[in-house]
Amino acid sequence: MELYNLKNKLEKVSFLEATKLGLGNKQGLFFPLKLPYFNKKEIINLLSMDFISRSVFILDKIIGNEIPYSKLFSIVKKSFYFPIPLVKVTKNIFCLELFHGPTLSFKDFGARFMSNIISYINKTENKNITILTATSGDTGAAVAHSFYGINNIKVVILYPKKNISYIQKKIFCNLGKNITTIAVNGNFDMCQKLVKKSFDDFLLKKKLNLNSANSINISRLIAQVCYYFEAFAKFKKYGYNNLIVSVPSGNFGNLTAGLISKSIGLNIKNFIVATNSNDTVPRFLNSNIWLPKKTINTLSNAMDINNPSNWPRIIELFKINNWDLNNLYYGSVSDNLTKKSLIELYNLNYISEPHAAVAYNVLKKFIKNTDFGIFLGTAHPIKFKESLKLIIKNDILIPNILKNTNNLSISSYNMDYDFNLLKNFLLTL
């Protein structure tokens, strides 16, 4: 698999190199020079496979011969061992629940795949690596648990101090060992800027062998392609035509993976960009003017991002496939409408959470009677226990996987938004 830097197309790397580097020169994202394409017959064969076998086949075609098939099978089996239920909500609307992994978030797919790829690389290179990443809520937990206890790898996670839920902090801000968490006095965009500045710093990159586990890392991104095929496979009894997928979008990695699945042959009719009030992309699609504004704190905090990193990849996908951006569905949802959607879903006997409720709200605006719609459930409702109790007037039972976290204290460093502070901290860690 050969990839190029979107900001410098002369910089080309292999899949394993792109995974190690995270970002290219000038903070450029890596993008595949060529993607495979599955014809209709091949898609039908793929959809008849079980999730693991299908995922290995797809990833092997994307990655190429850099990883032996048997080794890739082992990596995928270790990474994707949790269920992906497709739950019927109305006669033609379903939720694809992606939150049944160890940290109750869709991020478990990409993070666990990446950690197993990094471990595979490290067995031959035996280098010390520092994973530096920013999180708006769920990435941090998934990355922390995926890399926890792995030799030669330190993980440093930045998160906005006041903008992630208490339960989200409880899941990953107390692990210790090779996991360090930093609460930044600022929003997610500021955390992300600190990470990107670190990758532009020659001393940090050289001394620490920096890598990032955000969805800017190509290994995380391609892992997510696999569950779009699983969603389609689960749809057999409804037919494969007229399927619309609504994606709650923050940093836009999830939507990028969905568009890659369409690019390589999956017959999804359309995707919906569903954001909260941080609506840079919907405004851009409406006006063709890219104008990020100040980030607003919302109920769907993981989407409180106004400068999404993966958007250049989406632009590139539309360009190489000769797709028209004007055909992409989109919408933004206020907190008030999010609350109404949560109540509506509850009255339909489905307990959801704010991010999925945003996707559900926008999906309803575009779906027709002849369509089927899927909205992605990206986090377990328990992560928003306090706010949901106020909205739906009902408590949510804590799943067994979280019961042990109640007695753990939150142990994070506090830091102002200052790159020099972060740099000095990293160099002495």
Image (cartoon, rainbow, N blue to C red):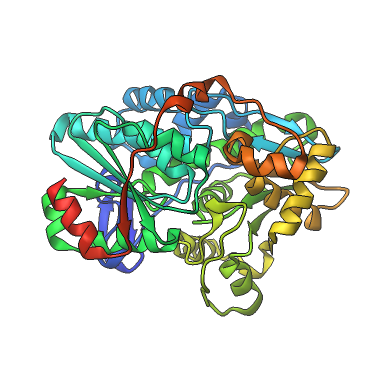
Spot occupied by residue 219 in the image (x, y as percentages of width and height): 37, 43
Spot occupied by residue 172 in the image (x, y as percentages of width and height): 40, 36
In which image quadrant can residue 381 be found? top right
Spot occupied by residue 376 in the image (x, y as percentages of width and height): 64, 43
* Residue at x-position 75% and y-position 34%: 394
Q: Is residue 60 visible?
A: no
* Residue at x-position 63% and y-position 59%: 276
Outermost residue to the right: 369
Q: Is residue 334 above or below residue 133?
A: below
Q: State which quarter of the image contains the C terminus.
A: top left
Q: Is residue 366 above or below residue 231?
A: below
Q: Is residue 206 left or right of residue 164?
A: left
Count of marks placed on residues: 0
Closest to the observer: 2 or 171? Answer: 171
Q: Is residue 155 left or right of residue 300?
A: left
Q: Is residue 416 visible?
A: yes
Closest to the observer: 13 or 149? Answer: 149
Q: Is residue 90 left or right of residue 267?
A: right
Spot occupied by residue 220 in the image (x, y as percentages of width and height): 41, 43
Closest to the observer: 231 or 172? Answer: 172
